[in-house]
């Protein structure tokens, strides 16, 4: 059901919901940029509609709101194990504002953590308590290529919130538990259709007949041996990357007690493929780039039927060496076509 209300009306609803839910959205952190005094847009807790960055893309993805970069899973001693509190402990749940591409990225996370054999317990206990609100995109951001990755539209949300003009808020509510809030604050009740972009400036062409053997044989991957500095920022900003390492931390005052942590990992950094005996599967940065690219547009698709990449463009935005993943996809497509692969 659709509703038209004022910002003041929405703020009253957010205030009511915040008694039970932690509310996260992209917001502007003044002087938050690590390399200058410029503002930084990333996810954080919000209390009012004016705190939400409707017209800016977050540098990091929504994952860090409920999947901490470093998360303690449990504590242990010689005799006992105690489960650590959930990131949402003490709250009924969380509400996270997402763009359409990010909602598609959430579908990828669910495939890996919930539908890939046994469900991940620590992911599921949080995921079950989260509601998602769509942030419609009226215009694409420069690096986005969501249309070509078919992630520009979605129906999978509890509600959408779109600003129209100075003080008008358009709501499309799919969660019937929330209708009572919106009905009370609504100035009008009428159908609302969220905005979705239908064209982006950045375009990509994913080769349909790509094979791993064919892609591995291409020579351009070696260009990234020197150009990529394996910082891993592309992975950490990606909403669909799911790799992590397990680390046991032993306390200095009692070496037989400690905690187990799950920490985000990156297939681009040193040590990711190290194995016993001093071996490593991908020592060169070009090999790592090839693995990442094929995992995003080939391996995942062969397994689940759609690409892992959703075209949010964050990896293009954040790379300090200006390496463009959209360009890599197009180079891959061009080389395959030139070699008669399609």
Image (spheres, rainbow, N blue to C red):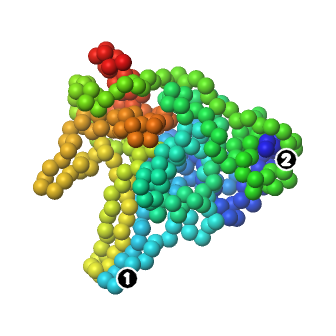
Query: For the C terminus, which image quadrant?
Result: top left
- Judged left or right of residue 146, residue 335 is left
Q: Residue at x 39, y 31 (%)?
A: 325
Tell me if I can see residue 14 in this picture: yes
Which element carries disc 1, helix, strand or loop?
A: loop
Count the labels in the image. 2
The answer to whether 168 appears left or right of 325 in the picture is right
Image height check: is 203 above or below 169?
A: above
Q: Which residue is mark 2?
A: 186
Q: Residue at x 34, y 27 (%)?
A: 210
Mark 2 or mark 1: which is in front?
1
Quadrant of the image containing the N terminus = top right
Specify few, some or many for label 1: CA neighbours under 10 Å numbering under 14, 14-19, or 20 or more: few
Q: Position of residue 293 (x, y in %)?
A: 35, 34
Q: Earlier in the sequence, mark 2 or mark 1?
A: 1
The outermost residue toward the left is: 277
Q: Which mark is residue 101?
A: none
Q: In the rendered image, which residue does mark 1 sit on?
A: 80
x then y, percent, for residue 158: 68, 49
Q: Quadrant of residue 322?
A: top left
- Which secondary structure, mark 2? loop
- Residue at position x 49%, y 24% from top? 202
Q: Is residue 90 above or below residue 340?
A: below
User: Where in the figure is residue 302, as x and y percent of width and height?
Assistant: 39, 37
Image x and y of residue 95, in percent: 63, 54
Relative to residue 162, is residue 123 drawn left or right?
left
- Residue in view at x 72 percent, y 55 percent: 14
Mark 2–mark 1 distance (CA, rounded to whole Å): 53 Å
The answer to whether 44 is drawn above or below residue 6 in the figure is below
Image check: 217 left or right of 122? left
Q: Is residue 169 visible?
A: no
| Number of residues whose C-alpha sits closer than 10 Å to that of mark 2, classed few (under 14), some (14–19) or many (20 or more) | some
């Amino acid at each position: 059901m659709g509703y038209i209300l004022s910002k003041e009306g929405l703020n009253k609803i957010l205030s009511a919901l915040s008694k039970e839910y932690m509310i996260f959205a992209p917001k502007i952190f003044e002087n938050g940029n690590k390399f200058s005094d410029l503002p930084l847009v990333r996810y954080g807790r919000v209390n009012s509609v004016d705190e939400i960055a409707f017209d800016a893309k977050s540098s990091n993805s929504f994952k860090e709101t409920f999947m901490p970069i470093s998360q303690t899973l449990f504590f242990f001693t010689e005799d006992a194990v105690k489960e650590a509190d959930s990131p949402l402990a003490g709250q009924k749940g969380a509400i996270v504002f997402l763009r359409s591409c990010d909602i598609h990225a959430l579908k990828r996370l669910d495939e890996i953590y919930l539908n890939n054999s046994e469900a991940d317990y620590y992911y599921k206990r949080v995921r079950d308590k989260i509601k998602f609100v769509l942030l419609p995109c009226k215009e694409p951001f420069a690096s986005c290529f969501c249309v070509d990755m078919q992630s520009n539209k979605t129906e999978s949300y509890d509600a959408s919130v779109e600003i129209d003009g100075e003080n008008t808020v358009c709501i499309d509510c799919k969660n019937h538990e929330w209708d009572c809030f919106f009905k009370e604050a609504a100035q009008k009740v009428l159908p609302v259709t969220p905005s979705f972009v239908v064209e982006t400036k950045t375009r990509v062409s994913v080769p349909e007949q790509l094979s791993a053997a064919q892609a591995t044989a291409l020579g351009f991957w070696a260009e990234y041996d020197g150009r990529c500095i394996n910082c891993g920022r592309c992975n950490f900003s990606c909403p669909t990357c799911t790799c992590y390492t397990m680390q046991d931390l032993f306390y200095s005052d009692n070496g037989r007690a400690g905690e187990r942590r799950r920490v985000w990992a990156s297939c681009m950094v040193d040590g990711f493929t190290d194995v016993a005996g001093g071996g490593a599967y991908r020592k060169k940065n070009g090999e790592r780039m090839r693995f990442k690219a094929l995992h995003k547009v080939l391996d995942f698709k062969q397994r689940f039927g759609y690409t892992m990449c959703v075209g949010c463009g964050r990896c293009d935005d954040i790379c300090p060496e200006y390496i463009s993943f959209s360009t890599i996809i197009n180079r891959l497509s061009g080389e395959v076509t030139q070699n008669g692969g399609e």
